Amino acid sequence: MSATQSEAQLTEHTHTAQRQSLDERYGRTPGAERRTRTLMIVAGVIFSIVFTAWVVWGGLSGTNATIETRELGYSAVTDTSIDVRWEVSAAPGESVTCAIQALNESFGIVGWRIVDLGASDERTRVFIETIRTAEPPVTALPYRCWLA
């Protein structure tokens, strides 16, 4: 065996011993790697179970109450008011509240009104409402409706 081979083996042995020493010092042992891998797998399985349960619960539980609104138009535009005509579809017997807005030519809100719509036996109803405005409006429409 030559001197360079024995120096290379000694250097390799020294590096291996140092690496093992550092691995033990900082907890990088084969057992720690297995524990970390096992912990990650268990956490992934738990997350998958919880996520699946949440999706099923959210999709199958609760009421599927839907409210649909549709703008039908506007008329009687003056510098201080506008009439808006809209349609609301909700389950019969449900009270609905809607926010109606009027917009100026820059699409800024210049008028706003909250309207309470009582319960009805009909699913779809049409309404006309006058909105007072701070500036001349160019359009009006239902902003949002919700169950009251």
Image: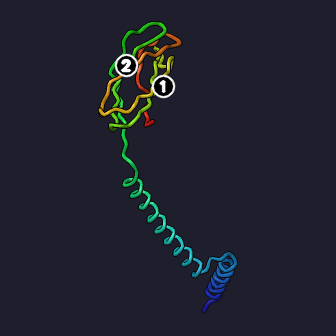
Say which label, 1 or 2, has the lower sequence index. 1
Q: Using the image as rendered, state which of residue 8 and residue 141 is in the foreground.
A: 141
Q: Disc 2 residue type?
A: Ile
Question: What kind of element bears circle 1?
Answer: strand
Q: Residues within 10 Å of mark 2 (few under 14, many from 20)?
A: some
Q: Residues within 10 Å of mark 1 (few under 14, many from 20)?
A: some
Question: What kind of element bears circle 2?
Answer: strand
Q: Residue at x 32, y 37 (%)?
A: 92
Q: Residue furthest bottom?
A: 1
Give residue 98's position: percent from left, percent from top: 44, 29
Give residue 113's position: percent from left, percent from top: 48, 22
Count of marks placed on residues: 2
Quadrant of image for the C terminus = top left
Q: Residue at x 45, y 25 (%)?
A: 115
Q: Disc 1 residue type?
A: Ile
Give residue 51's position: percent from left, percent from top: 45, 60
Residue receiving disc 1 = 114
- The mark found on residue 12 in the picture is none
Q: Residue at x 49, y 14 (%)?
A: 132
Q: Residue at x 41, y 9 (%)?
A: 77
